[in-house]
Amino acid sequence: MALESSSPIDSLESAMYTDYKTDKSVSIVEKISNNVDEANLITNKVTIHKLIENLEQRDKEVIMLRFYKEKTQNQVAKILGISQVQVSRIEKRILQNMKMELVS
C-alpha cells in the first residue's frame, strides 16, 4: 500500500490499492465511502432550511423545538405558553404546508 501511494492518480475513482487481507483491488472512494448519498443529504438539508426560513417566528420556534431540540408537544406548549393541542395543530399545519411546497 505504501508503494502504491507514491504513484500518481487521475482521480479518487481511479485510485486503487490492493487490500492484502482479501487480495482484491479497492478504489479509495470505496474505502472511504460510508454508503450515504451525501449530495442528496445536503440538498435535503438546504431545502428544509429554506422552508423553515420562510416560516413565521412562532412556527419556526415550534419546528426548532420539536425537531431540532427534540422537545415533546407538552414541553413546547409550556415553553411557548400555549396548549399542547395548539402545538399539535400548528405542527400539523406547518408540515402539510411544507409538504405542499415540496410537491409543487
Image: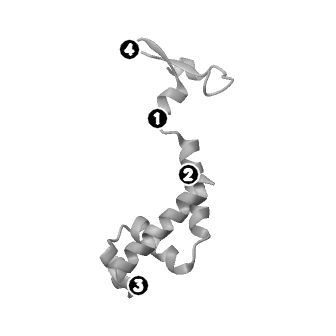
The crowd level at tag 4 (other Cα within 10 Å; few <14, some 14-19, many 20+) is few
Q: Please give the name of the residue rendered at 62% of the width and 63% of the height, measured from the top-left corner.
A: 50
Q: Answer above or below: position of 17 versus 70.
A: above
Choose the circle earlier in sequence order: 4 or 1.
4
Which labelled disc corresponds to residue 80?
A: 3
Q: Which residue is mark 4?
A: 22
The disc labelled 3 sits on which kind of residue?
A: Leu
Q: Residue at x 48, y 69 (%)?
A: 93
Give the residue type that dot 1 points to. Answer: Asn
Q: Nearer the viewer, residue 89 or 46?
A: 89
Q: Residues within 10 Å of mark 3 (few under 14, many from 20)?
A: some
Task: Choose mark 1 or mark 2, whichever is in front.
Answer: 2
Which of the two labelled residues, at mark 3 and mark 1, occupies the earlier sequence position? 1
- As measured in the structure, the alpha-carbon distance from the residue carrying label 1 to the one carrying label 2 is 17 Å
Position of 47 compared to 89: left or right?
right
Residue 78 position within the rendered picture, expressed as x and y whole percent measured from the top left: 33, 84
Which label lies toward us, 3 or 1? 3
| Mark pair 4, 3: CA separation | 58 Å
Instruction: Point out the tag, 4 or 3, that comes first from the N-terminus.
Output: 4
Instruction: Give the spatial CA distance, label 4 vs label 1.
Output: 20 Å
Q: Nearer the viewer, mark 4 or mark 1?
A: 1
Secondary structure of the residue carrying tag 4 is loop
58 vs 101: above or below: below
> Label 2 near label 1: C-beta < 8 Å?
no
Q: Position of residue 64 (x, y in %)?
A: 46, 70
Q: Mark 4 is on which residue type?
A: Thr
Alpha-carbon span between mark 3 and mark 1: 40 Å
Looking at the rendered structure, the secondary structure element under dot 1 is loop
Mark number displayed over residue 44: 2
Dot 1: few (<14), some (14–19), or many (≥20) neighbours within 10 Å? few
